[in-house]
Image: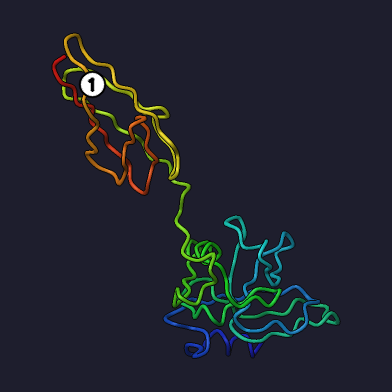
């Protein structure tokens, strides 16, 4: 326990921290041998922490990063107490998973970031690399010039969704062209476009028949 308080009070770990970090005390599950500093831990239903494999890096898991090497010998009858980062800026090259993987993917790093643990530099992350968050749903806005109407199907979607536009001209007018008011999209001759990173606004333009 003396060692624990020593760890909690120590200055920044020069081999792990890239910036400031907040530490908490965690109880490690016995039976994992010597768990190395920088290991990602996840909280089990028992309340004890264990080394995390890739499948444990999810947004539903409570994740921390171990500060110093800690022995979790099976002969222990009481869970070993240790210090772990619950937030902070850590060196990506020193953060590891239980299978020895030392290069987390960008997707895994994003999950850690959402829980307050930021890995630097981003270049040290394994090339599943900089993955965009394609899960955000954006709305498609369709306007007109007053000489007809237009609609989009579907009217919303995530990045990569194909949208079909349908123009309907007022009496005495015919459809002329689509004007992309905002959003990085290109409407094809088939009146379709693919949603990108931004919510698009498309204007239908009509001319006299």
Picture quadrant of residue 64: bottom right
- Residue 81 left/right relative to 108: right
x, y percent for residue 136: 44, 46
The residue shown at (16%, 14%) is 209
Residue 88: percent from left, percent from top: 46, 74
At 77% from the left and 77% from the top, the residue drawn is 32
- Name which residue lies at 21% across and 12% down: 170
Q: Nearer the viewer, residue 60 or 174?
A: 174
Does 135 sit above or below residue 59?
above
> Residue beneath label 1, please?
175
Q: Is residue 48 left or right of residue 124?
A: right
Q: Quadrant of residue 5?
A: bottom right
Q: Quadrant of the N terminus?
A: bottom right
**92 or 118, which is in the foreground?**
92
Please state if 72 lies on the left or on the right of 96 as rendered.
Answer: right
In the rendered image, the vertical position of residue 160 relative to residue 171, given as above or below: below
Q: Residue at x 41, y 27 (%)?
A: 153
């Amino acid at each position: 326990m003396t060692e624990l308080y020593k760890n909690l009070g120590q200055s920044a770990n020069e081999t792990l921290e890239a910036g400031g970090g907040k530490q908490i005390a965690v109880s490690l599950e016995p039976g994992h041998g010597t768990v190395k500093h920088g290991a990602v831990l996840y909280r089990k239903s028992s309340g004890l922490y264990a080394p995390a494999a890739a499948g444990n890096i999810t947004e539903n898991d409570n994740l921390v990063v171990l500060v110093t090497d800690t022995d979790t010998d099976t002969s222990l009858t009481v869970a070993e107490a240790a210090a772990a980062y619950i937030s902070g800026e850590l060196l990506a090259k020193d953060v590891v998973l239980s299978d020895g993987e030392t290069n987390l993917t960008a997707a895994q790093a994003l999950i850690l970031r959402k829980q307050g643990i930021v890995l630097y530099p981003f270049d040290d992350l394994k090339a599943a690399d900089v993955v965009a968050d394609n899960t955000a749903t954006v709305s498609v806005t369709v306007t007109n010039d007053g000489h007809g109407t237009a609609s989009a199907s579907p009217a919303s979607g995530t990045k990569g969704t194909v949208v079909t536009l349908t123009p309907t001209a007022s009496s005495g007018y015919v459809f002329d062209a689509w004007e992309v008011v905002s959003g990085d999209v290109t409407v094809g001759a088939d009146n379709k476009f693919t949603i990108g990173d931004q919510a698009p606004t498309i204007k239908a333009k009509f001319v006299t028949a």
